[in-house]
Image: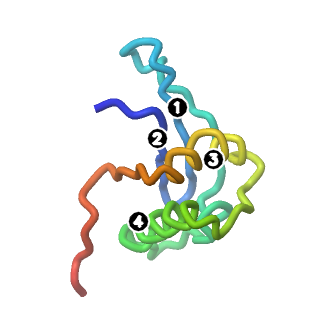
Amino acid sequence: MSCPVGMLVTPEQVRFYRNRYTGYAPQAIEMIGECPTGDLLRVFPKDSLRESELERSVEEWLEGLRVGSDRSWPSAVREAVESSVLPIVSDGIVRAGGPRWRRAG
């Protein structure tokens, strides 16, 4: 499946990507923004940061975009968020790279 915008989040960095649809080669995908995770999600990397905590923070951030809760993005990713992510999320189209479920406990 092809999608126009991608977001890669690690405990240290957030990167935004855009598919230019110029072909099937990896060069058709360009990175359009990057910033420290803590600057965007207000979650700061720590040795014990669990995957579930990071996942929850990303979900809350994306869902917050739909309701307009926080519009203070780092300048390094402002254009990427405003031109690529916000229009898609505002239309209610959000897809994760995996199932959206939580482990009990």
Mark 4 to mark 2 CA distance (whole Å): 15 Å
Q: Looking at the rendered structure, which numbered label has been put on residue 7?
A: none
Q: Looking at the rendered structure, which numbered label has been put on residue 6?
A: 2
What residue sits right under mark 4 in the picture? 55
Which comes before the other along the chain, label 1 or label 4?
A: 1
Mark 4 to mark 3 CA distance (whole Å): 18 Å
What residue sits right under mark 3 in the picture? 81
Question: Residues at badges 1 and 2 in contact (C-beta under 8 Å)?
Answer: yes
Which comes before the other along the chain, label 4 or label 3?
A: 4
Residue projecting furthest to the right: 75
Circle 3: residue type: Val
Give the quadrant of residue 65. bottom right
Badge 4 local density, few (<14 within 10 Å), some, or many (20+)?
Answer: some
What residue sits right under mark 1 in the picture? 18
Which comes before the other along the chain, label 1 or label 2?
A: 2
Residue at horizontal 41 percent and vertical 65 percent from the top: 55
Circle 2: residue type: Gly
Give the label, 4 or 3, closer to the camera: 3
Mark 3 to mark 1 CA distance (whole Å): 11 Å
Which comes before the other along the chain, label 2 or label 3?
A: 2
Residue at horizontal 44 percent and vertical 65 percent from the top: 59
Circle 4: residue type: Glu
Mark 1 to mark 4 CA distance (whole Å): 21 Å
Badge 2 local density, few (<14 within 10 Å), some, or many (20+)?
Answer: many
Mark 2 to mark 3 CA distance (whole Å): 11 Å
Q: Secondary structure at mark 4?
A: helix
Residue 63: x and y, percent?
49, 65
Circle 1: residue type: Arg
Tell me the quadrant of the picture where the C terminus can be found: bottom left
Question: Residues at badges 2 and 3 in contact (C-beta under 8 Å)?
Answer: no
Residue at horizontal 46 percent and vertical 41 percent from the top: 6
Residue projecting furthest to the front: 91
